[in-house]
Image (cartoon, rainbow, N blue to C red):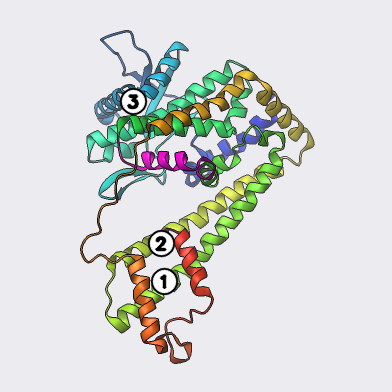
Amino acid sequence: MPTALALLLSVAGAASAQAPALIPQLRPILSDVPSLGEIVVRPAPRRAPVLVFALRPSSPARAAAERAFFDAALARLESTEEGRRIVADLSARGMTVPVSFALIPGTKVSTEGGAEFVDGVAGYFTRDDGRLTFSDRFLALRDPAAAQASLATTLAHEAEHARLHAVVAALAPWFGNVLTIDAANERNAFLSEFLVASELGIEGVEVRDARSVTADAPKFWERKRLGRPLYALALTLEEMSDPVAAWQGRLVKLKEKQAKAARTVSDTIPFNIELLEHMERAHGLRAPDLRREITEDLAELQGTVKSLQETIDYLESRVAMMDDAQRKSDLLRDLRLAAANPGYRAVTDLVAQKAARLAALVPPAPPAPPAAPGTMTWDDFYDRVDEDRAKHPEHWDPSTRGPVSLGPTWKVLLAELSEAGRG
């Protein structure tokens, strides 16, 4: 008979099969990807293979390219201490890890600071068949070396999921269900990803996240937990004593975050667009970079409001399932058994060990590049606005059809805009 926790998680699997649009949120761990014919692609001629990855090509035409790309990324992974640790442990357990590239809805190639990256869900681990699935967008990146290094960090993340599930499954069959909603599962995977990125010396989102988690781990993990449905479900060992209370508290934070994002969309961004339009119309100011930036922010925050609602709906459905007294009792029993097991607790202890290693390894942030000549920052823009308010108060008088009546909301709106990344 399935455990209460298995039933709790099964709805997510069903939702991912029925609603492809939710795959980026629901499939970092859970998936219904079928297991088809596979090609073993890691022969390791120099020595006995430390790990066999079985690659299922997405198509015969792409098989050679995917094989070469994956092998190059695996070599980058194995060039790091953290990568070798993961690979050696999986090998010692006699595991064969299936791998495939696939189209993951919502994942795309984006550019930041002139560098391309895979934006969205880059990969996920499937418990049922132990498969690692990676976005086919990795092969669309134009810089092969950067693409291989990026896949190596994602491979570290997903392979660590596979390794941790093997560890806890050896302790008790139902511990895999507990691990799926254990915060230590994702934290360990992210820290493995950051360690590999830091060891490889690449400068990208992974190393920036490594600096963030090293500077303020509680803040970083809280932000991650409010990012996707399954992350929002995650519990620390302490929270496992009362998961419903933990989820209800998280719902409050999710709704506050959504309300703030919605206010930025409805008030703060239109307010700043109005300021831009006034300064352009009345004073000939030209700030195309700010225009582009605020337009992109608007689209991103509209997506954030929507994704937060999906996370809220998901978490509320899990809380509602706990109205069943027997199901709640069974869940608490499974969580209590895992939390009391020394072998299982070692998974949580590993988080602190990795964090200490990362703190000693993560490189300092490089100096910010100088702004291009003539580039206007938001600080520059607000200085111009303040000058205009001092010299031309009539521009800001609503009775003379000024752009806005700033009043006491000025600082509030600027504070919100700063939280959204401006100012």
- First in sequence: mark 2 or mark 1? 1
Amino acid at pointer 2: Arg
Residue 312 visible at all:
yes
Check disc 1 and report the residue beneath it: 272
Numbered tag placed on residue 422 in the rendering: 2
In three-dimensional space, the C-alpha distance between marks 3 and 2, rounded to whole angstroms, equals: 36 Å
Q: Residue at x 59, y 34 (%)?
A: 181
Q: Residue at x 38, y 43 (%)?
A: 208
Could you tell me if the residues under marks 3 and 2 are in contact, i.e. CB atoms within 8 Å?
A: no
Q: Residue at x 34, y 11 (%)?
A: 49
- First in sequence: mark 3 or mark 2? 3
Residue 133 visible at all:
no
In this picture, which residue range is highlighted in magenta?
A: 202-220
Q: Is residue 217 magenta?
A: yes
In three-dimensional space, the C-alpha distance between marks 2 and 1, rounded to whole angstroms, equals: 11 Å
Residue 238 lies left or right of residue 98; in this view the side is right
Q: Is residue 10 magenta?
A: no
The secondary structure that dominates the magenta segment is: helix
Check disc 3 and report the residue beneath it: 77
Q: Secondary structure at mark 1?
A: helix
| Depth check, front residue: 345 or 314 | 345
Circle 2 packing at 10 Å, graded few (<14), some (14-19), many (20+), is: some
Tell me residue 239's x, y (percent).
67, 37
Amino acid at pointer 3: Leu
